[in-house]
Amino acid sequence: MSTIRFSALQETLNRKPVKIVETERRSVLFGQNVFNKYAMQQYLTRAAYESVMNAIDKGTKIDRKIADQVAVSMKDWAISKGATHYTHWFQPLTGATAEKHDAFFESINGSLAMEKFDGEQLVQQEPDASSFPNGGIRNTFEARGYTAWDPTSPAFVYETTLCIPTIFVAYTGEALDNKTPLLRALQAIDYHATAVCKYFDKNASKVNATLGWEQEYFLIDDALATSRPDILMTGRTLLGHISAKGQQLDDHYFGSIPARAMSFMQDLEQECMLLGIPVKTRHNEVAPNQFELAPIFEEANLAVDHNALLMDVMHKVSTRHHFKVLFHEKPFAEINGSGKHNNWSLSTADGTNLLSPGKTPMKNLQFLTFFINTIKAVYENEELLRASIASASNDYRLGANEAPPAIISVFIGTQLSAVLDELENVTKGKLSPEEKTDLKLNIIGKIPEILLDNTDRNRTSAFAFTGNKFEFRAVGSKANCAIPMTVLNTIVAKQLKEFKIEVDTLVDTKNLKKDEAIFNILREYIKASKKIRFEGDGYGEAWEKEAKKRGLSNNKTTPEALQVKVAKKTIHLFEEMEVMNRVELEARYEIDLEEYTKRLQIESRVLGDIARNHIVPTAINYQNTLLENTKNLKEVFGDDFKNIAKEQIELIMIISNHITEINSLTLKMIDERRKANKLEGLKSAEAYNKKVKPFFEEIRYHCDKLETMVDDNLWPLTKYRELLFTR
């Protein structure tokens, strides 16, 4: 193994940046391989184009004749881009994307051929996709899972394949993917947010949820990654003593981007431009070899598709540059992990951001309405929001270094906190003319000025307001954004629905004016949700104790966090908002538990293999060298050898103790794993969490100690200093 390590290091040191030539401006490249509005105008008839746009904007159905026209035009466009195949591109409950490629090719009478693609093939397919996780929704022998075209997300050509974004559902109608519930949640937020918008603008017709994700990742040379079985099998390092230099100098953060990484980024960004992914920002992150890219905000469904596509493209582009991309939330101990901050907002059809104040008191009251309702929604559903980002890998990150803790809190800054405190004291019922004037001029009217200079930022808050959006910082870098976005949009839609009912009731029964009713309800919401607001440091026991006093949940592990997914309150919420039914929720709960269990099972097996088959033999090998040295010293110095070989003898004993502990702990871990494997569902997940996982750190401790003692030339695993600083 040490030979592999040093060969990998030599290979890495000989790498040169791949030269990337940008021949076109990015504005020219953008969307060239996307069947977007421009392409549709070029290839579709007016009737077909209007039908597709109505489906996108209004949710109307596309009839079969129009679908045939769209399919033929889409095929002709795709072939002009070099496509030979098409696929229904979907997002099953694995968290990744899926595709099955079919050629446009069709034979005629065995002697002729043609390219064929019709409306039936565009609109719906029946892939043999029975092996994807389904949580009991369908039987394995039933291959009747259907993919159906989602016209709101444009088709695109990648390499030689026309990719058609689709949903994936069972023959009974239940969702087998992450996109279907998201689309339902977006429909719910549109309906209920638009209804509230009409208080402020009678012409409001549509509200879109918007998303801007920030993708963090590590770049490791592929030769070095291949030399580490744990990285290959689990996406993270299960062993490894920390490097003497890590991130403590903050010299990597926002520093000059390394040449090879820059070439990778340029190549990736060109691919993104062609695919219509509006990436804009790139920079070094805090940890060595950690980076980030972020796009311009988009409509949430499209943004989710683009992030899922981006992660796939990153893997493919990285191979051209001899890199391996690590999306694991915590691939290295003692340095920052990676997140995928989800920046969420709401905007009207004309582009007005509902979480941004305007020039008039009425616009600012609109801002406060959506701002306070979002905070209230998070407070009422903080456990569910925590569950939406729960995973075995994200558990390693939450509460570590830069990441927020597992406690969901809302940070809004001192200035906005002061505004809410003033609003909390608004008179109940009808407002006096003086109070109305004071509210509009001194509180509501000054919000734009407050936000203009609002530089507060709390990096330990899971859910922070950052000027004109909320940033959900606890989302993990591996995650599919659809899951937290489905939850967030659903809970806010539910909250807005309740808000409108309460406001209308006050107007109808208490004879209050609309703005008075809104102030009254907002005041009560501020009081009710005050416990979720936190302006302090989210690290440490002090906040945990304070959060417990406030009644906030602190579900540190995935098995704890997931249980709320099948609580009565959750089922009622999703069914009321028509986002998911009981069957779909229970299926996802089972899948999430199984995923968690399997991840820890794999990590346990890999750790046991490396510890006993690589680390222990290496330590024994080095120990034998020390024993031979001690033996030779005894032959030369006789009885005096004990003083001369004192350090060697002590080192031999220490190594023996570590070897004994590794073998003993590994056997105990295997025994606990066998017991956990006999259990099912939550019991199995809890057993892995409480009985198996604790051995990981104990075994690692002894292996990492040996790393500091064994001859570097013998050590089999590529070390942290090499993984993080070889560029």
Image (cartoon, rainbow, N blue to C red):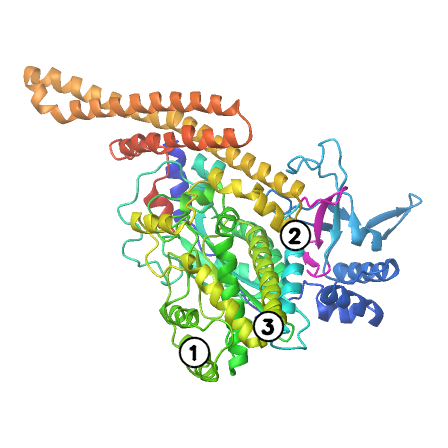
Quarter-wise, where is residue 132 in the image?
top right
User: What's under tag 1, amino acid-wise?
Assistant: Ile
Task: Tell me, yes or no, whether the two marked residues, 3 and 1, touch with CB atoms within 8 Å.
Answer: no
Circle 1 packing at 10 Å, graded few (<14), some (14-19), many (20+), is some
User: What's under tag 3, amino acid-wise?
Assistant: Ser
Q: Does dot 2 land on a helix, a strand or a loop?
A: helix
- Mark number, residue 443: 1
Q: Nearer the viewer, mark 3 or mark 1?
A: 1
- Residue at point 35%, 34% (across, down): 697
Relative to 196, is 180 above or below?
above
Picture coordinates of residue 178 (x, y %)?
Answer: 63, 49
Q: Is residue 12 visible?
A: yes
Picture coordinates of residue 529 (x, y %)?
Answer: 45, 59
> Disc 3 designates what residue?
27
Picture coordinates of residue 305 (x, y %)?
Answer: 62, 56
Q: In terms of depth relative to the viewer, which is nearer, 525 or 323?
A: 525
- Mark number, residue 692: none
- Dividing the image into 4 quarters, which one contains the N terminus? top left
Q: In terms of depth relative to the viewer, which is nearer, 457 or 76?
A: 457
Does residue 173 show up magenta in the picture?
yes
Q: Which residues are magenta?
A: 151-176
Does residue 628 show up magenta in the picture?
no
> Disc 2 designates what residue?
576
Quarter-wise, where is residue 60 in the image?
bottom right
